[in-house]
Image (cartoon, rainbow, N blue to C red):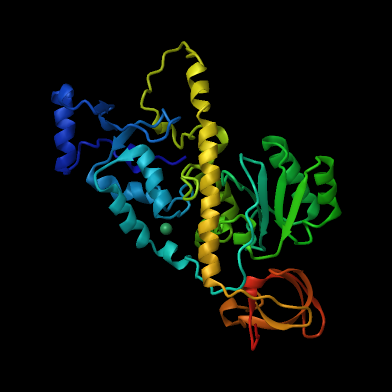
């Protein structure tokens, strides 16, 4: 783990920041007049009552002098461990460890002028179809969404795909780079690294790619008696996990893939850590907190009490256990926020959508999802945006099987990727 700018700047008092110096000197000369501040190893900390009930580790925040603030923001936004996450997550991440006046507006300024973030911002497409009903979910790792991303540029370790497993309740994500996206490899990862670590889920949401409908995976899911398996069509992450959560992951990954396409797999564990330890907009908690009942320490420099005695003393666990009792009310709160968010999303989504329904035989235009391919001199920006096709089966008012105009099957698609042409309703 890299050291922070604040760790390497040997003496934070070597600053021209008068506000900082005032408090630092005041605290040094007359500690009782500055009861909320403490100096440790020549660095200034401020006591802030944590908003989070269970969070006792993070009450002392390091005070950052002016000169170091933009490096500190950059560390907590642009590093792989920070994942280029948005304003909200970047701010919450900083506020967990640091304090300075005006931090929030500094973060807004920094993130909204970050070139990498701007270039990866997603467009809002005008789309068809109303949003489906939410599926019920009340605790971590009860409902999982599984997505395969790729092919991506092959790394030096020959990884070309990522499997993204997301807990729909906590938004905890597990990212696995893969050399080949075979059903056998995916099944093994799910069994060994997900099921046997976090338990067997009650519901799995996945797209209907061939790896997911394979008999290998089916047998494994049968072996563990997973009761609900839902297949959703491709390119519908908003249907898959209610809020379009994968976009956060894909944006984080793509911002770093751009830097060096041959080493993105080395960054995956850090991106996963960044996402799991950033506050989620919908739940109001970090995924780690909802899964583990505590925030994870992101760097050893967080421990300001460094002179630990040789003897290890165990403090009674009752207090921690008592705090964990609060989790049930937090889970209830998260669940209701989850439903509210879905209602809000679907109201907003439905407002922007035209209600539409197709029938077998209808000719429609389907959005294209090309990957650029330098070797084949193919750039997706020059490719057509829609292709003409025909509906061959209706799975639901939102989901259709399509074929091209020569009758070759094109798979299953969500209505949001279809375009109306002279369609009457
Ligand atoms: Zn950024």
Which percent across, then down, holds residue 272? 55, 47
Query: Quick check: 305 above or below 363?
Result: above
Pick whichever, 299 or 388, lies toward us: 388
Q: Tell whether 53 sits left or right of 238.
A: left
Query: Quick check: 211 above or below 298?
Result: below
Which percent across, then down, holds residue 130? 61, 67
Query: Quick check: 334 above or below 147?
Result: above
Pick whichever, 398 or 285, lies toward us: 398
- The structure residue drawn at horizontal position 78% and vertical position 57%, both measured from the top left corner, is 211
**Is any part of residue 137 visible from this angle?**
yes
Quarter of the image where one finds residue 425: bottom right
Number of labels in the image equals 0
Which percent across, then down, holds residue 416? 62, 71
Which percent across, then down, holds residue 139? 61, 39
Q: Tell whether 193 sits left or right of 85.
A: right
- The structure residue drawn at horizontal position 77% and vertical position 85%, both measured from the top left corner, is 405
Pick whichever, 294 or 128, lies toward us: 128
Query: From this viewpoint, which residue is outermost toward the bottom?
Result: 422
Q: Tell whether 20 sits left or right of 242.
A: left
Query: From this viewpoint, which residue is outermost toward the front?
Result: 425
- The structure residue drawn at horizontal position 17% and vertical position 34%, both measured from the top left corner, is 23
Whereabouts is ligand 1, in terms of quadrant?
bottom left
**Is any part of residue 260 visible from this angle?**
no
- The structure residue drawn at horizontal position 71% and vertical position 56%, both measured from the top left corner, is 206
């Amino acid at each position: 783990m890299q050291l922070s700018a604040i760790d390497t700047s040997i003496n934070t008092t070597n600053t021209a920041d008068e506000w900082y110096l005032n408090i630092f000197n005041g605290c040094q000369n007359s500690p009782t007049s500055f009861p909320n501040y403490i100096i440790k190893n020549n660095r200034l900390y401020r006591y802030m009552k944590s908003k989070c009930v269970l969070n006792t580790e993070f009450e002392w925040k390091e005070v950052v002098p002016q000169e170091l603030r933009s490096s500190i923001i950059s560390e907590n936004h642009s590093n792989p461990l920070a994942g280029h996450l948005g304003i909200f997550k970047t701010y919450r991440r900083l506020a967990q460890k640091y304090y300075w006046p005006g931090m929030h507006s500094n973060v807004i300024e920094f993130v909204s002028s970050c070139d990498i973030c701007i270039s990866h911002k997603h467009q809002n497409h005008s789309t068809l179809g109303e949003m489906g009903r939410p599926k019920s979910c009340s605790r971590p790792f009860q409902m999982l969404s599984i997505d395969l991303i790729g092919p991506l540029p092959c790394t030096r370790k020959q990884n070309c795909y990522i499997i993204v497993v997301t807990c729909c309740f906590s938004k905890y994500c597990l990212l696995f780079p893969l050399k080949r996206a075979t059903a056998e490899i995916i099944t093994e990862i799910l069994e060994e690294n997900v099921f046997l670590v976090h338990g067997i889920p009650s519901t799995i949401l996945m797209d209907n790619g061939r790896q997911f409908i394979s008999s290998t995976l089916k047998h494994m899911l049968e072996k563990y008696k997973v009761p609900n398996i839902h297949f959703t069509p491709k390119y519908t992450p908003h249907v898959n996990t209610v809020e379009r959560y994968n976009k956060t992951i894909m944006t984080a990954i793509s911002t770093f893939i751009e830097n060096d396409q041959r080493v993105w797999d080395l960054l995956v564990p850090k991106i996963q850590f960044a996402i799991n330890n950033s506050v989620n907009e919908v739940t109001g908690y970090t995924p780690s907190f909802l899964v583990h009942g505590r925030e994870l320490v992101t760097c050893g420099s967080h421990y300001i009490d460094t002179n630990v005695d040789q003897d290890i003393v165990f403090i009674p666990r009752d207090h921690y256990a008592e705090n964990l009792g609060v989790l049930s009310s937090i889970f209830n709160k998260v669940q209701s926020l989850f439903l509210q968010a879905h209602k809000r999303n679907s109201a907003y989504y439905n407002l922007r959508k035209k209600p539409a329904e197709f029938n077998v035989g209808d000719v429609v235009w389907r959005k294209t999802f090309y990957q650029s391919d330098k070797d084949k001199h193919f750039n997706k920006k020059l490719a057509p945006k829609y292709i003409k096709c025909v509906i061959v089966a209706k799975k639901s008012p939102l989901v259709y099987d399509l074929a091209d105009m020569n009758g070759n099957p094109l798979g299953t698609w969500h209505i949001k990727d279809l375009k109306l042409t002279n369609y009457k309703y």
